[in-house]
């Protein structure tokens, strides 16, 4: 059985790898859980300005739920910046209250975890920085 710390480090590595692969565009997707396992699902960035923003297809959330997955949250990358949330990230979080919101920054390489609320992103009590 994988220790929780080990799974967290694996997810952090997957997040940074997906961010590097998509650069110079923002990568994005869902954080899914089923049968005690958590993983990142990569999705096409549907934003019309994918170098500076991201958009996840809401139908992907329904598709994941129909597959029996819990949608734990949303992740995306900042290919040109840090892992701190942008003003747009705080605004966008209002659409996903209660969900985790993970950000990978490539300058410098780092990853942060947040909880979406109707008032914006709050640091995850479990530890905002990996
Ligand atoms: Zn962002």
Image (cartoon, helix red, strand yellow):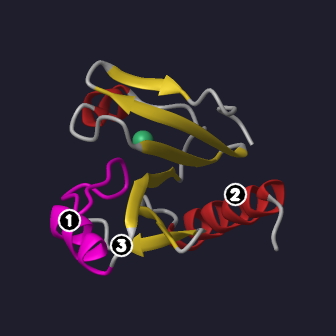
Q: Mark 1 packing: few (<14 Cα in 10 Å), some, or many (20+)?
A: few
Q: Residue 121 sits in which quadrant?
A: top left
Secondary structure category for the residue under label 1: loop
Task: Identify residue for label 1.
Answer: 57
Which residue is rendered at x = 26% and y = 24% of the image? 118
Indicate the quadrant containing the C terminus: top left, top right, bottom left or bottom right.
Answer: top right
Whether 25 is drawn above or below 97: the answer is: below
- Is 112 magenta? The answer is no
Marks 2 and 3, how far apart at CA: 17 Å
Residue 38 in percent (x, y) is at 57, 66
Foreground residue among 1 and 44: 1
Q: Mark 3 packing: few (<14 Cα in 10 Å), some, or many (20+)?
A: some
Which residue is rendered at x = 37% and y = 55% of the image? 51
Q: Quadrant of ligand 1?
A: top left
Furthest residue to the bottom?
67
Query: Is disc 2 in contact with disc 1, using a CB cutoff of under 8 Å?
Result: no
Closer to the N terminus: mark 1 or mark 3? 3
Whether 38 is drawn above or below 92: the answer is: below
Which residue is rendered at x = 31% and y = 54% of the image? 54
Foreground residue among 16 and 70: 70
Marks 2 and 1, how far apart at CA: 23 Å
Task: Identify residue for label 3.
Answer: 43
**Left or right, 6 with reference to 45:** right
**Left or right, 8 with reference to 125:** right
Ligand 1 within 8 Å of the CB at mark 2: no
Query: Is disc 1 in contact with disc 3, using a CB cutoff of under 8 Å?
Result: yes
Residue 12 in percent (x, y) is at 69, 57
Marks 1 and 3, how far apart at CA: 8 Å
Residue 82 in percent (x, y) is at 60, 38
Closer to the N terminus: mark 2 or mark 1? 2
Foreground residue among 43 and 61: 61
Task: Identify residue for label 2.
Answer: 12
């Amino acid at each position: 059985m994988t220790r929780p710390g080990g799974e967290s480090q694996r997810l952090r590595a997957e997040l940074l790898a997906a961010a590097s692969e998509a650069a110079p565009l923002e990568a994005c997707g869902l954080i899914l859980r089923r049968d005690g396992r958590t993983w990142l699902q990569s999705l096409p960035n549907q934003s019309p300005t994918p170098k500076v923003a991201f958009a996840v297809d809401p139908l992907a959330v329904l598709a994941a739920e129909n597959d029996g997955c819990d949608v734990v949250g949303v992740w995306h990358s900042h290919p040109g910046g840090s892992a701190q949330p942008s003003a747009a990230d705080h605004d966008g979080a209002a659409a996903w209250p209660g969900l985790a919101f993970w950000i990978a920054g490539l300058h410098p390489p780092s990853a942060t975890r947040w909880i979406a609320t109707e008032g914006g992103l709050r640091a995850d009590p479990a530890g905002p920085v990996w």
